[in-house]
Image (tube, rainbow, N blue to C red):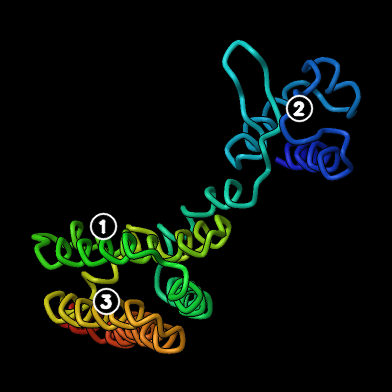
Amino acid sequence: MALTDEAMDKIKAMIVAGELAPGSRLPKEEDLAGQLGLSRSSLREAVRALTAMRILVTRQGDGTYVSSLEPHLLLESLSFASDVSQGHTALQLLQVRRLLEPQATGVAAVLLTEEDLRELGAILERSRAAATVEEFVGHDIAFHLRIVEAVGNPVLSMLLRVLSTRTQRARIVRATRTERAVEHAHREHEEILRALRSRDAQLAVSAATVHVAAVEQWLAADLVEAPARAGSGRRE
């Protein structure tokens, strides 16, 4: 593993130094291994790992290339961390989301088009009709993403996707009293949309902050109650 890490570091160093530019093709395996003083097996493992991280991209029959290295592309690989986050780690991710998303919502208040606002209203209508937690979460994600995308910053959009994925949101909703949690979310979504329709950036920030903070509170309460539930189960 140490050899693979060393190989990865050497390839990344070439990219940082500009020896391998975004979109450029890597030298032949034999040549690159010799240049870096690596075995071909260590180089292959490093290439596989860097490909998984979206730093490199393999084109069938054409070789391996440096990706575009755009930040939002590299952030995609971090979404798994949110998917598997549990307990206090999930809470920390939500805290970061609370620092970012309300401000983005405030910026979007003056950028959303009338068509965007109509679509947001339609998303909330579909959300109200959702029959399952998964369906509700899908609409919830679409609602927030449509707002953030109006800011026009793909890095911000991807980062907020990473901080709160579909899997994480569904898990949190299930950990609460689901009907109550969903009903609260519906009301909070309507408050956010009302602020956006009025083009009131400050009110939009406030409404979004309340919404994300509520999700934090649900999760924090569940963390407190979890040990008691576990203890009750053991006594039984």
Location of the N terminus (image quadrant): top right
Mark 1 falls on what kind of element? helix
Q: CA distance from mark 3 to mark 1?
A: 14 Å
Q: Earlier in the sequence, mark 3 or mark 1?
A: 1
**Residue 120 drawn at (x, y percent):** 28, 65
Q: Which residue is mark 3?
A: 189
Q: CA distance from mark 3 to mark 2?
A: 45 Å
Q: Which residue is mark 1?
A: 138
Residue 165, quarter of picture: bottom left
Neighbour tally class for label 2: few under 14, some 14-19, many 20 plus, Cα within 10 Å: some
Q: Is residue 71 left or right of residue 15?
A: left
x 20%, y 82%: residue: 187
**Residue 110 drawn at (x, y percent):** 46, 74
Mark 3 falls on what kind of element? helix
x 38%, y 85%: residue: 213
Tag of residue 148: none
x 44%, y 77%: residue: 91
Location of the C terminus (image quadrant): bottom left
Instruction: Inspect the image, locate mark 2, and give the three-letter code of the amino acid beneath it.
Output: Ser
Q: Is residue 9 left or right of residue 207?
A: right
Q: Is residue 96 above or below residue 68?
A: below
Q: Which residue is mark 2?
A: 24
**Residue 55 drawn at (x, y percent):** 67, 39
Check whether the beta carbons of the residues at disc 3 and disc 2 lie within 8 A of each other: no
Q: Earlier in the sequence, mark 3 or mark 2?
A: 2
Instruction: Inspect the image, locate mark 3, and give the three-letter code of the amino acid beneath it.
Output: His
Q: Nearer the viewer, mark 3 or mark 1?
A: 3
Q: CA distance from mark 2 to mark 1?
A: 37 Å
Residue 162 visible in the picture? yes
